[in-house]
Amino acid sequence: MRQLKIAVPLGGGANMKKTLVVTAVVGLALLGTAAWATLPQVDPATVPIGNLVANNRVSTPLKIKVDGGSEHVLRHGSEVFIRHLEFPAGTSTGWHTHLGPVLVNIVRGSLTLYDGDDKTCTGVTYTAGQGFVDQGFGHVHLARNEGSEPTHFYATYILPPDAGDTLAIPASPNPNCPASVR
């Protein structure tokens, strides 16, 4: 299970110390199996591939912590991107990292996630209705479509305001993974 905590300061007064803490626990699905079954879904085939939201500047400062990772403070807000991606069978992202966390929702097919420091190179497969949070901030990973059909997924990037259009940064492969995991 991955845990994402985002703290957003509320109010503008000096005496206001309220903080809203949003905790999203990613287990079997980001929205939960029951919610997935009851919410109307948009057919991914009707949604354009590519950026749905790009360089959306959010001026609210954020504190972000995923799992047991370090807490990161984006004092000057963030840039948010939402992308609809399609991976044909057998393709991958290549080993990479992000400048901030990425929330991934699988809407069709499956995606297998490999961790850059997993000594056993054991992938975790997510299918339609499931999702995961990549902690970003240097966390190296690779996602592959190991299925027989195209995978469609939505990725929401929460990046520092100076990230520009840098959504992924190439990284060295996990030395524990065979060459077939690329």
Image (tube, grey):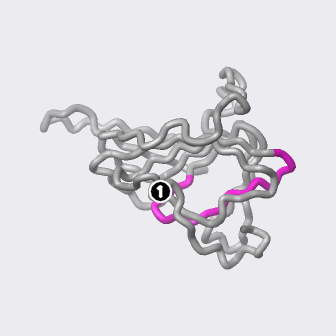
Is residue 145 found inside the magenta-colored segment of the image?
yes
Out of 132 and 153, give the one closest to the viewer.
Answer: 153
- Residue under circle 1? 166
**Where does residue 132 sit, x and y in percent of width and height?**
61, 48
Q: Is residue 107 above or below residue 164?
A: above
Residue 110 is covered by the magenta coloring: no
Q: Quadrant of residue 175 in the image?
A: bottom right
Q: Residue at x 40, y 45 (%)?
A: 79
Residue kind at label 1, given as amino acid type: Thr
**Is residue 63 left or right of 2 when viewed as pictured?**
left
x%, y% of residue 156?
53, 43
What residue is shown at x 26% (from left), y 35% (from top)? 18
Image-based side of 166 in relation to 129, left or right: left
178 versus 74 height, above or below: below
Magenta segment's dominant SS is loop
Q: Residue 176's image quarter?
A: bottom right
The answer to whether any part of residue 151 appears in the image is yes
**Residue 26 falls left or right of residue 182:** left
Q: Which residues are magenta?
A: 134-149
Q: Would residue 25 be seen by someone viewing this image from the given angle?
A: no
